[in-house]
Image (cartoon, rainbow, N blue to C red):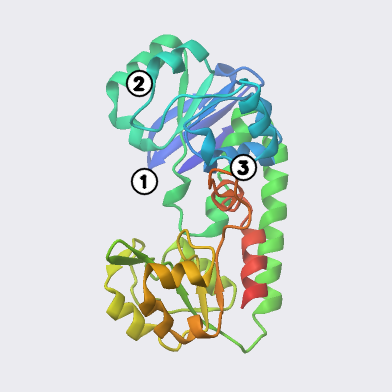
Amino acid sequence: MFGIANFDSYSQLFFLDGTDTTWSIKSSDLPSNPKMVVLSSVFAGYVELLEKQDQIIGVDNYKYYCDSLLLKRFEQQKTIEIGEEGQLNLSKLLQLRPDVLICSSFSSQDQSLIKRLKKSGIKLVFCDNFKEQNPLARAEWIKLFGFLFNCQSKADSLFDGIANRYEKQISINRAKSLKPLVLTDALYSDVWNVPGGNSYTAKLIEDANGTYVFKNKNELFSYPLSLELVLKASENCDIWLHVNQYKTKEELFKANNRYALLNVFKQSRIFNNNKRENRFGGNGFWEIGVVRPDLVLKDLISIF
């Protein structure tokens, strides 16, 4: 988690592990409009909402990104690929000389990388938003990017608007008596990984007034289940969401004809999050949906 403290002449970003500060960075240590490398399209979503795409000069893999301004920058070679986390092209990264590299705390284990970046004057900033299981808590990481771009008030205002819209939709929708039973995901190889009952996905379903099929699996992580177990638990479900990469019932059936045993399949109540994709299959849901849970919730309420 992180916190921001404001002092008379500067602000300071703190990263916390429990109650201990693991590291921090002062606003005075950054240029007012830093050049940035991001190692996930999720991180780019925060930058896009702040309208700072021109500051992104490097990414992991441009095929993952959907924002039109970023795609234009890739075509103009103003933003380049430097490789995915754990497989960085360090030479390319150092040649770019960004002010900030945004990655997950996974990279904190690479002491050689940290040493090289420090020597080159590149600030390493961790964005562990994926650890947040509340959609609004995950969206609130926009404040970290507001700090980095010296636009904290704008980030605060954007988040407040998102939170207000999110909470208002919950309040209005709670009065409805209908609570559809909801299944998520699909087989991957021979395993059906279902989110835990306290996960980010389960929370979104609950907030949209749905009942998650596996809500009693109380952990945060995904559970690897067999097809048979999922079919038995979901035979009477009303809605099926996020069916991996599939775009049609025909594709689902071709992948495994036993999907057709589900009533929800027979009644065509299947919805996926792939309306906004680039030509490579990069999914805008992961790029902007994390920072705009109010939009995701609005869609879910409509579906339910």
Per the model, the C-alpha gap separating discs 1 and 3 is 35 Å
Give the mark, 2 or 1, whose residue is nearer the N terminus. Answer: 1
Name the residue located 66 percent from the left edge and 85 percent from the top edge: 176
Disc number for residue 18: 1
| Mark 1 or 3, closer to the camera | 3
Q: Where does the image place residue 184, in percent across and percent down from the top left?
A: 45, 70
Disc number for residue 282: none
Is the residue 94 above or below the residue 24 in the image?
above
- Asked whether the residues under the numbered discs 2 and 3 touch, taking CB atoms below 8 Å apart as contact, a structural biologist would say no
- Residue that mark 3 sits on: 66
Q: Secondary structure at mark 3?
A: loop
Q: Where does the image place residue 260, in percent across and percent down from the top left?
A: 43, 81
- Asked whether the residues under the numbered discs 1 and 3 touch, taking CB atoms below 8 Å apart as contact, a structural biologist would say no
| Residue type highlighted by circle 3 | Cys
Per the model, the C-alpha gap separating discs 2 and 1 is 23 Å
For residue 40, side relative to residue 303 (left or right): left
Give the mark, 2 or 3, whose residue is nearer the N terminus. Answer: 3
| Residue type highlighted by circle 2 | Ile
Mark 3: few/some/many CA within 10 Å (<14, 14-19, 20+) = many
Mark 1: few/some/many CA within 10 Å (<14, 14-19, 20+) = few
Is the residue 195 above or below the residue 182 in the image?
above
- Residue that mark 2 sits on: 114
Quarter occupied by the C terminus: bottom right
Q: Nearer the viewer, residue 65 or 181?
A: 65
Residue 7 visible, this orientation: no
Name the residue located 47 percent from the left edge and 31 percent from the top edge: 60
Q: Secondary structure at mark 2?
A: helix
Is the residue 248 above or below the residue 70 in the image?
below
Name the residue located 37 percent from the left edge and 36 percent from the top edge: 105
Q: Where does the image place residue 299, in percent across and percent down from the top left?
A: 65, 67
Residue 127 visible, this orientation: yes
| Residue type highlighted by circle 1 | Gly
